[in-house]
Image (spheres, rainbow, N blue to C red):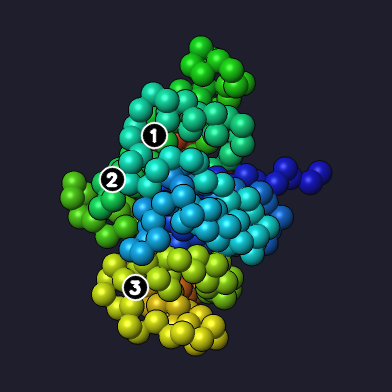
Amino acid sequence: MTARPLRLLIIGAHPDDADYAAGGTAALYAAGGNVVRMVSLTNGDAGHHAQPGPKLALRRRAEAAAAGAVIGAAYDLFDIHDGELLPTLENRAKVIHLIRSFEPDIIFTHRPNDYHPDHRYTSQLVQDAAYMITVPAVVPGTQHLMKNPVIMYLPDEFQKPYPFQPTVAVDVGPVLNTIVDMLHCHESQFYEWLPYNTGILDSVPAAEPERKAWLSAQVKARLRKQAERFRKLLGQCYGPEGAKIEFAEAFEPCEYGAPLDEPARGRLFPFLPTH
Ligand SMILES: [Zn+2]
């Protein structure tokens, strides 16, 4: 009997959050023959210093589609203005519809305490949808689900009210170049807006190979730092091999999703060693 492919849904606020925070794990899922869908709850139309607005939204839709195509995943944008996402009933219904129609085994999303209001409300909307997806009378136009998926939070560095507490860490070294290939598609972000916003626009190389190498160095530094931060957890997940892992992503279970017990963990993270 062949197992049904797993279905991973990553719900971010902006059209680069999903692959930025979980691109490696998404690539491992896809490489294993599973189905990955990435979604941005906003259209990203505020994410530029010089060219905000509808043209940027179109540009970011194309960038996201290209990033998803790197791993054969759909990458969809909701048509909600960037910076204006709110946890309204209307948006909750959209998220309920999204989850019900995709039927994910597992969802990744932001934590509820995060610097960006769109990230916070994305998390809030996923939490608000979590149980409601099983209630037939809620958003009756779409078939309810009989079970909640597992929901995991993406990493961040915020300390209040409590720091990120992952229970799963993933070695993303084998797919590091794939992560860079995905992020490289978000030209408007990684080579324009984010360097402008952090005051390093002058350091972005103009030519294609140089700027991709520049991006790669940044991605490596960030994921290497995460591997150090989650070293103990990597040891729990990979045994002695965990000490050698250079690049990592990590995830924290959300209590409003299905519990990530041992059988669920083995099923939903098939690329982790069993020991
Ligand atoms: Zn974001």
Of the two numbered discs 3 and 1 in the rendering, the one whose residue sits closer to the viewer? 3
- Please tell me whether mark 1 sits on a helix, a strand or a loop: helix
Q: Which residue occupies the foreground of this view, 128 or 194?
A: 194
The answer to whether mark 3 is within 8 Å of ligand 1 is no
Residue 25 location, x and y as percent? 54, 60
- Residue positioned 55% across, 86% down in the render: 209
N-terminal-most mark, 3 or 2: 2
The count of marks equals 3
Is the C-beta separation of discs 1 and 2 under 8 Å?
A: no
Q: CA distance from mark 3 to mark 1?
A: 29 Å
Q: Which residue is mark 3?
A: 195
Image mark for residue 72: none
The quarter of the image holding the C terminus is bottom right
Q: Amino acid at mark 2?
A: Pro
Image mark for residue 117: 2
N-terminal-most mark, 3 or 1: 1
